[in-house]
Image (spheres, rainbow, N blue to C red):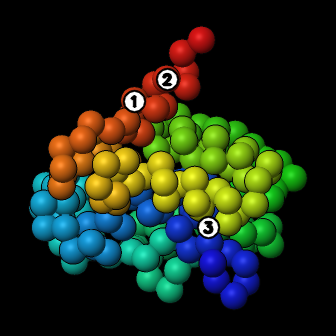
C-alpha cells in the first residue's frame, strides 16, 4: 500500500494489476511472457509497469480514460464514484475476461478492506502447488504444470446461471 492508502496493484477500474501480462513480464523478467507480449500486442520498449497507481505505468495505462475520469472526480477508484458502476465501466467490463473480473473486484471492495482484497488476489493469482505468480490468461503453471483457472474460465463461469 502507498502512503495515501492506495494499492499500486489495484487498477482504478478494478483489475488486479499483479496478474497483468505486462506487469508479470516486466516484474518477473519472464522472457517467454515478454516474447508473447511482443508477438500479440506491444513493442518490447513498452513492456514495463509496476501497477496502476505506481510510479511506473506503461503508455496505455497512463492514457486510460478511467485514470482521467477519476482525477477529474477527485477519487482514486471507480467504486468510490457516486455513479458506480457507470455505463463506460460496464461496457469496458464486457470487452475482456480480466475486465469482467475487475467489475466484480470493485463491487467486492465495497464489502471488504483493501488489504483483505489484496491478500485474496495474491492467493488467487498464484499457483496453488508451487506459489508461482500467474497472469490472467494462465491455464497452467509454467513452473510446475499445475492446471489453474484463467480469467477467461472464471469470467465464463460468472455469466452462467
Please tell me whether mark 1 sits on a helix, a strand or a loop: helix
In-image side of 44 versus 88 (left or right)? left
Ranked by sequence position, the earlier of labels 3 and 1 is 3
Viewer-closest of 65 and 26: 26
Residue at (68, 49) in percent of width and height? 106
Disc 3 to disc 1, C-alpha distance: 28 Å
Cβ atoms under marks 2 and 1 closer than 8 Å: yes
Cβ atoms under marks 3 and 1 closer than 8 Å: no
User: Which residue is label 1 attached to?
Assistant: 153
- Asked if 55 appears above or below 26 in the picture, the reply is below
Name the spot of residue 158 as percent of width and height, x first: 55, 25
> Total label count?
3
In-image side of 68 versus 42 (left or right)? right
Please tell me whether mark 2 sits on a helix, a strand or a loop: helix
User: Which residue is label 3 attached to?
Assistant: 67
Residue at (24, 55) in percent of width and height? 41
Callout 1 environment at 10 Å: few (<14), some (14 to 19), or many (20+)? some
Cβ atoms under marks 2 and 3 closer than 8 Å: no
Name the spot of residue 157 as percent of width and height, x first: 49, 23
Residue at (42, 39) in percent of width and height? 151
Residue at (34, 58) in percent of width and height? 131
Of the numbered discs in the image, which one, if any, rests on residue 157? Answer: 2
Disc 2 to disc 1, C-alpha distance: 6 Å
Please tell me whether mark 3 sits on a helix, a strand or a loop: helix
Amino acid at each position: 500500500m502507498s502512503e495515501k492508502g492506495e494499492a499500486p496493484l489495484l487498477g482504478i477500474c478494478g483489475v488486479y494489476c499483479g496478474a497483468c501480462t505486462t506487469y508479470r513480464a516486466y516484474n518477473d523478467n519472464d522472457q517467454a511472457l515478454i516474447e508473447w507480449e511482443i508477438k500479440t500486442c506491444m513493442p518490447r520498449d513498452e513492456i514495463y509497469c509496476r501497477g496502476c497507481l505506481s510510479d511506473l505505468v506503461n503508455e496505455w495505462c497512463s492514457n486510460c480514460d478511467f485514470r482521467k475520469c477519476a482525477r477529474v472526480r477527485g477519487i482514486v477508484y471507480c467504486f468510490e464514484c457516486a455513479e458506480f458502476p457507470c455505463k463506460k465501466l460496464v461496457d469496458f467490463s464486457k470487452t475482456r475476461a480480466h475486465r469482467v473480473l475487475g467489475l466484480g473486484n470493485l463491487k467486492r471492495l465495497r464489502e471488504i478492506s483493501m488489504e483483505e482484497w489484496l491478500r485474496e488476489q495474491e492467493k488467487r493469482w498464484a499457483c496453488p502447488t508451487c506459489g508461482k505468480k500467474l497472469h490472467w490468461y494462465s491455464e497452467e503453471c509454467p513452473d510446475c504444470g499445475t492446471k489453474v483457472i484463467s480469467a477467461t474460465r472464471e469470467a465464463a463461469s460468472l455469466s452462467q446461471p
